[in-house]
Amino acid sequence: MTNYEDLFKKVIAHCKEYGFVFQSSEIYDGLSASYDYGPNGIELKNNIKDYWWKSMVNINENIVGLDAAIFMHPNTWKASGHVDAFNDPLIDNKDSKKRYRADTLLENYISKIEAKIEKDCLKAAKRFGQAFDRKKFVSTNKRVLARQAEINNLNEKIHTHISSGNLSAIKSLIEDLDIKCPVSGTSNWTDVRQFNLMFKTQIGAAKSADLYLRPETAQGIFVNFLNVQKTSRMKIPFGVAQVGKAFRNEIIARQFIFRMREFEQMEMQFFVRPGEEIKWYEYWKNTRMKWHKSLKMGNENYRFHDHENLAHYANAASDIEFKFPFGFKELEGIHSRTAFDLKSHQKYSGKKLMYFDQEINKSYTPYVVETSIGLDRMFLAVLTNSLCEEEVGNGEMRTVLKIPPLLSPLKAAILPLTKKDGMPEKARKIMQDLQIDFNCQYEEKDSIGKRYRRQDAIGTPFCVTIDHQSLEDNTVTIRDRDTMIQKRVSATSLRSIISEKVNFAKYLY
Ligand code: ATP
């Protein structure tokens, strides 16, 4: 088993054992790519949501919130282009009967060439030592240049074939590159077909038009553009933010909660003057990257991936990628969506979606810059980055989730040393005092050591122990999750010590 498979298996097992994530309908053997969030999972998820909402809505005077319905008028999806173009090209291997996204098979092939370039660089770095100049090496080394040229050539072909919908050319490319099914090892492929990712359903008993479960939350914002702008008296530039479920009938939904069929998005659509969209696109790219880095999960774990193949509605797009155990993958997308959506809804609905800009005395259809992050992917990023096992002396190991304390499900565990001599009563009092501000847990079962381990495993930043001395002088010991250092402090100072670590203001960029 590779290191990554090993870590990933541990994360999944940990999620189940400690009530973060369960397989959906597990007693019926589960439903693939659907997951339920347990008691600790929902706290972590809510904390991520809360941090995003505060950073986007509460501290920006020109961003307001919305909660639109999941069901929308069917014309919404014709206008947005999803009925015609929200497709993935799929291909089956006739021997293994496994189904793949044709573009993913090609992208994986490219990733292998990229990995070879990395290997070349590592080797050269070893050979040249301190004098190694990566930039120079990749721009002059013949072998690397040839590999890069192959990548560029393939990217161009993929882009051309996908954007022109030339499915037989995509199949030929897979055959020419001799890409094999990882399960059967053969290249006995079916033709490539388009597959629409939207889930269809019907409303009520009468025969009516098909409804779709929304595949993105953004359209709820576009159709409400004027409702929100007028009622909140927003002036351009302004944004509308929304958190909610989205549904996509993904061809292959693997990698735990990385790719699900039902997931949650946190999106913000920022309306700007035409011609100013690229300035705002750059602004949001940087602002969102700062947000991620503010959580201190390692700056080296993030990178931008600017798109060369743009969606039909975009004039610029970039992903913020995170280093998951299975490599750098998209965590958030920042897209300059032009005026495509508003103009299209205008056309399909016959209603004007224009804005009168008093400053320049002009009416126009605003341009839009979107930031779109998957809540479940963010959850997975936090968990995979935080889970570690470390030695704590005497050969003993502990499993600890080093979650950014702001996001931890619990902020403090309140632990009476024993169940007698008035310690539980004192601990309960401290708990009552703290739980108004912080999510805390009272625990009296098992030895203190065992209780520490349980709290480490769910990422609680502080353990507060109440002992005999506490009854006499109102002091307690507070143990830090990461350093394991214990300090004796006055119970009255607990609020400010905990707040210092979990306060929103401490994180914000
Ligand atoms: P991908 O290329 O991984 O399919 P995408 O480019 O289609 O993603 P967007 O449409 O830009 O994704 O959606 C915005 C965000 O929503 C993504 O960055 C991701 O975090 C999240 N997301 C998209 N699809 C899924 C899914 N099936 N499961 C979980 N999260 C998802």
Image: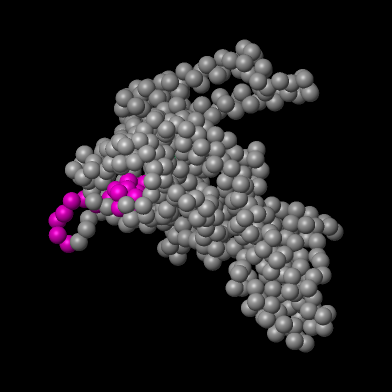
* Residue situated in front as seen by the camera: 228 or 425: 228
Outermost residue to the left: 207
Q: Position of residue 329 (x, y in %)?
A: 53, 39
Q: Residue at x 65, y 25 (%)?
A: 119
* Residue situated in front as seen by the camera: 478 or 252: 478
Outermost residue to the right: 394
Is residue 9 visible in the rendered image? The answer is: no
Q: Position of residue 421 (x, y in %)?
A: 77, 87
Q: Residue at x 69, y 52 (%)?
A: 388
174 up-or-down from 299: above or below = above
Q: Position of residue 309 (x, y in %)?
A: 42, 28
Q: Quadrant of the N terminus?
A: top right
Q: Position of residue 487 (x, y in %)?
A: 81, 66
Q: Residue at x 27, y 43 (%)?
A: 353
Taking the magenta stretch, the answer to whether it contains residue 218 is yes
Residue extent of the magenta highlight:
205-229
Query: Residue 346: which quarter of the image?
Result: top left
The coloring applied to the image is: one colour
Taking the magenta stretch, the answer to whether it contains residue 150 is no
80 up-or-down from 478: above or below = above
* Residue situated in front as seen by the camera: 345 or 384: 345
Name the side, left or right, on which 129 lies relative to 254. Answer: right
Is residue 235 visible in the rendered image? The answer is: yes
